[in-house]
Amino acid sequence: MVVSMPPAGRRCPAAHPEDPTPCVGSVVVTVLDRVNAGADGCEHHGARLLASLAGGRVYALPHAAPGTAIRVFTAAAGIRPFCWLDGPRVEPSQLSEIENRARHGR
């Protein structure tokens, strides 16, 4: 099993340049958008990226522990898109999936 860690002082490819948070763990998922463009990342940045995409998908890399993609998918549901940006969030596109479901009684 090969575990890929970002080089010292660098972050995984899924980390947005404006997101100040460090990687948590090794690179274990691939996150794809609607047109299959994607990035590999740690669980933390994979979830943050997935939360910021409309119609995104997540896949565990072959060396990832069982349940990794499910953990990232579940975490993303509670994260607001582009969560590192400040300011009021009132539009559905600015809220997490969980917040939108609660607003609409789903």
Image (cartoon, rainbow, N blue to C red):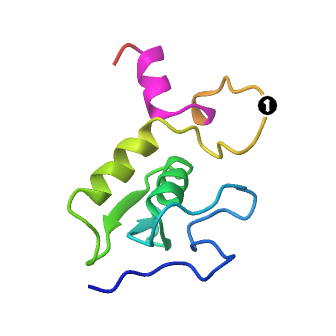
Percent coordinates x, y for residue 106 in the rendering: 33, 19
The image shows residue 19, relative to residue 94, as above or below, that is below
**In this rendering, would 44 be left or right of 22?**
left
- Residue range in magenta is 94-104
Q: Quadrant of residue 27?
A: bottom left
Residue ranking furthest to the left:
66
Residue at the image position 70 percent from the left and 55 percent from the top: 19
Q: Of helix, strand and loop, which mostly describes the magenta segment? A: helix
Residue ranking furthest to the right:
87
Residue corresponding to mark 1: 87
Residue at the image position 66 percent from the left and 62 percent from the top: 16
Percent coordinates x, y for residue 104 in the rendering: 43, 16
Q: Quadrant of the N terminus?
A: bottom left
**In this rendering, would 32 be left or right of 80?**
left
Percent coordinates x, y for residue 80 in the rendering: 58, 37
Residue at the image position 54 percent from the left and 59 percent from the top: 45
Q: Is residue 43 magenta?
A: no
Amino acid of disc 1: Gly
